[in-house]
Image (cartoon, rainbow, N blue to C red):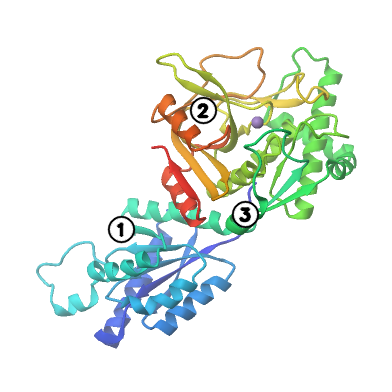
Amino acid sequence: MLKLPDYEFWFVAGSQFLYGEEQLKNVARDAEDIVKKLNESGSLPYKVVCKGVMTTADGITQFMKDVNYHEEVAGVITWMHTFSPAKNWIRGTVLLQKPLLHLATQYRQDIPYDTIDFDYMNLNQSAHGDREYAYLNSRLNLKNKIVYGFWGDEEVQAEIASWQDVAVAYNESFKLKVCRFGDTMRDVAVTEGDKVQAQIQLGWTVDYWPVGDLVEVIDAVSEDDIDREYQELRNKYDLAPQHNDAAKFTESVRYQLREYLGIKKFLDDRGYTAFCTNFQDLKGLKQLPGLAAQLLMAEGYGFGAEGDWKHAALTRLLKILAHNDRTVFMEDYTLDLRKGHEAILGAHMLEVDPTIASDKPRVEVHPLDIGGKDDPARLVFTGADGKAVDVTVADFREGFRLIYYPVDCRKAEAETPHLPVAKQLWTPTVGLRKGSEEWMKAGGGHHTVLSFTITPEQLHDLGTMLGMELVEIL
Ligand code: MN
């Protein structure tokens, strides 16, 4: 499964000395209480650590430097309990290299009409303290997240949780390494891209490796290891030999398991968490990796077909964000243009991630007209019903563009007995026609990541953190 470092978030309250020591102690106590209860709520995916009250420019600057250099810290959450003069935050905020969430909240949910006095007002100044602080961030063009509301509300906590996942994905983006077996598919434009820009802007390392080097590792996989995986496969999925004789079926499946174990070892030994293949570059391999790629995606590896390294990386990145829950590499495959049925049928030749299956996937072996190799084993299944997002990344001279729309997913209307691939049907929420027109005008390609877990807001936040141009078709 997808393993992530044990990230945490540092929380600070802003204040100043104007109100005296006693008030600052109260600020610290309230901040600690909020953090304690946020952690106890069970609604946050990552721990929050209270780092106290910040009152001076020097203290804030040092704090932000510490955040940058602590690998385990994924981001900062700030709260202005009182009025914290924003000039104190300029230097530190400019130096901060990690995501920032401004929690605009108040310790008390209500106004204590009966008891409110100037002591209370000296302490509870979020109403104007948050605006002073936000002015500075806006002026710095920080585009940081603001979550507004009572910190104890479920909705507010859900927003913090959602942002934490994005912030972790942002941190992990700079560690993401994609292994390209072969180049991109000949003559194709949309799978090309500027790998140097990808590393500068998104942190992605994108390396080429000759498929021959992979073949050596695949050929060295032991029969014992394949035996074990075969047993595992049988436990998890239905084996469906159908028209194949038993020996041919078993051999085909075993070869895919050999590819699975070989690719996995190759990637793990070199620190890669995403990869792409190209059916035009399979010299030395007996089959295009189908089942192999599907099993790796199910475990959380990113994958792009036809050498599409951008979507290999994006798949991995969004799997991190989604804790590998129903977030998959996808392709616009064929269309239903009839009125009342308007939909895109998503699939791929072989490589559809089984984490979106609504039925038990079947292992099947069929010929593949493309690539000129042996009949590959693959998982065949039906997709799911529900709300999702579909997202793509396109490369332009000006930088990377993140294009997405929310979609309504459903199962394919019928079986496709002559097209043995996994399938998922969806319609953009704005309608097939409008959605597709906007998508194409923006230069969005046919390879995407489809997620039942990620929200449009999270894509907005992630794209913003990564400095991408956003095309939101909402
Ligand atoms: Mn494709």
Label 1 beta carbon less than 8 Å to ligand 1 = no
Between 387 and 233, the one lying in front of the other is 387
Label 3 beta carbon less than 8 Å to ligand 1 = no
**As displayed, is residue 374 above or below residue 457?**
above
Q: Is residue 304 left or right of residue 456?
A: right
Q: Is residue 131 left or right of residue 191?
A: left
Q: Residue sitting at 74 percent across and 37 percent down?
A: 277
Disc number for residue 197:
3
Mark 3 or mark 1: which comes first in sequence? Answer: 1
Disc number for residue 303:
none
**Tag 3 and tag 1, C-beta contact below 8 Å:** no
Mark 2 or mark 3: which comes first in sequence? Answer: 3
**Residue 214 pos. (x, y %):** 84, 43
Write down the residue under mark 2: 384
Quadrant position of ligand 1: top right
State the image quarter where residue 259 is shown.
Answer: top right
**Residue 178 pos. (x, y %):** 70, 49
Write down the residue under mark 1: 148
Dot 2 crowding, Cα within 10 Å, few <14, some 14–19, many 20+: many
- SS class, disc 1: strand
State the image quarter where residue 303 is shown.
Answer: top right
Q: For the residues marked 3 and 1, what is the alpha-carbon distance in whole angstroms?
A: 35 Å
- SS class, disc 3: helix
**As displayed, is residue 361 above or below residue 242?**
below
Q: For the residues marked 2 and 1, what is the alpha-carbon distance in whole angstroms?
A: 34 Å
Q: Is residue 274 left or right of residue 473?
A: right
Q: For the residues marked 2 and 3, what is the alpha-carbon distance in whole angstroms?
A: 36 Å
Dot 1 crowding, Cα within 10 Å, few <14, some 14–19, many 20+: some
Query: Residue flagged by tag 2: what amino acid is it?
Result: Ala
Between 357 and 185, the one lying in front of the other is 185
The single residue placed furthest to the left in the displayed view is 114
Mark 2 or mark 3, which is nearer to you?
A: 3
